[in-house]
Amino acid sequence: MKCSGRPRLESGYTIVIVAFVMMMIIWGTFNTFGVFFEPLIKEFGWTRAMTSGASALNTIIFGILCVFSAGLSERFGPRWVTTVCGAILGLSYFLMARIASPRELYLYLGVFVAIGMSPYIPLLSLVPRWFPTKRGRMNAIVMSGMGLGQMVMPPVAGYLIFLWQWRNAYLAIALLTIVVMVTACQFLRNPPGEAASPAGATDPHDEGPASRQASRQALGQALRSREFRLLCVLYFSFLYSNVAITVHLVIHATGLGIPAREATITLALIGGACIIGMNVMGNLADRFSNRAALGISYAVMVLSLFWLISSGSEGSLFLFSIAFGFAYGGMQVLFSPLVAEIFGTRSHGVILAAGALAGSVGAALGPIVTGYIFDVLGSYTVAFILCAVLALTGFVSTLLLTPPSLRKSS
């Protein structure tokens, strides 16, 4: 049964607003780890590679759990999955305020926070199902929450650390997270005709075992396709560079002599430019193609990373942050509609989560390899060159996506 008209449209906008707020909290709070990075190292004497490892573990666990959360949301609906995860996310930050050992850091940030963040893919998958058209634009609005969170939360965290020290700053973040996340989750639901049945069926076109078997075969074909392999390369290169930069940029800036509170502005600029990139590239994708918009975003990221290698002043780092954030935002908003165009929406969440799982491997390696390179060489130059090369690999991969494959029916 299909529902159309103004009531569905208005409900869809409600979903977009709620998803925007949740993205702001999920990613804004996670990106504060780059601000807490130096206080943790100073207090406990940990190496950069070892401290980065908690972020690496987070991304691996997050990538795996996204597959499960996407499947659970498609089977039972998004509300209960996101509510449980939102509560866990808030409680995880309460625990972060109490850490005293690497084991606790890895458990709380690496595992518990990853569980709390896992509604990311269900949220991205929900929006295209509410909006058969304008997917790029609606996805851009939702993903702008990620950029706004990154623009606001790191400077706020830095200010709270300055006022109250890092443990009390984590307590404030925990309280904000649990209140906002649990409240927002209550407004989430599937589109009319897709509500989960008691048996867990969510597909309104599901006509029985034969239909489900055909769906599984289509999913298997998608996961074995050339386009899915390219999607994995794109996700890997994107998240490797992105997480490596967001974890190490602030401490890199302070190492250049920039005061800590000013250094956090780099993350804020990335977040602000991310919002612009999401909306510009989302609209560009709707007008032309996701492939073209993604290629432009990768090209800008390559150029920005080569700029970072030679940047040694506050102003040049700020310019890098703006360019990198624009590219990062463009990429982030395009993966979900790209998957919808290539593979359709029937198994959208699972396919997107599977691609993101490959990306999570890159996100795990990025910060820890970057930290290790610094620990060995005493410089980030080689690490930043590696990020640029991987971004260039992503750019080439966009050129290898074949336009006809982007027109498969859902």
Image: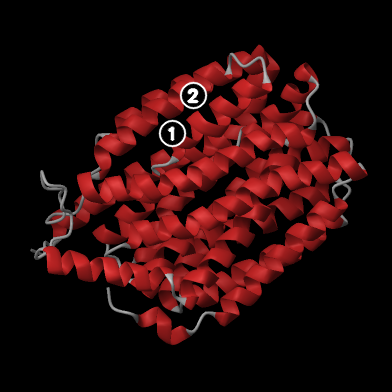
Q: Is residue 246 left or right of residue 78?
A: right
Q: CA distance from mark 2 to mark 1?
A: 8 Å
Q: 262 or 289: which is nearer to us? A: 289
Q: Is residue 88 left or right of residue 326?
A: left
Badge 1 crowding class, 10 Å Cα cut-off, few under 14, some 14 to 19, many 20 or more, is many
Q: Are marks 2 and 1 in contact (CB under 8 Å)?
A: yes
Q: Which residue is mark 2?
A: 92
The extreme bottom residue here reads: 404
Report the residue at 37% width, 24% height from top: 179
Badge 2 crowding class, 10 Å Cα cut-off, few under 14, some 14 to 19, many 20 or more, is many
Q: Quadrant of the N terminus?
A: bottom left
Kind of residue at badge 2: Ser
Q: Which residue is mark 1?
A: 116
Q: Is residue 164 left or right of residue 137?
A: right
Q: Earlier in the sequence, mark 2 or mark 1?
A: 2
Q: Is residue 49 above or below residue 238?
A: above
Q: Is residue 222 above or below residue 381?
A: below
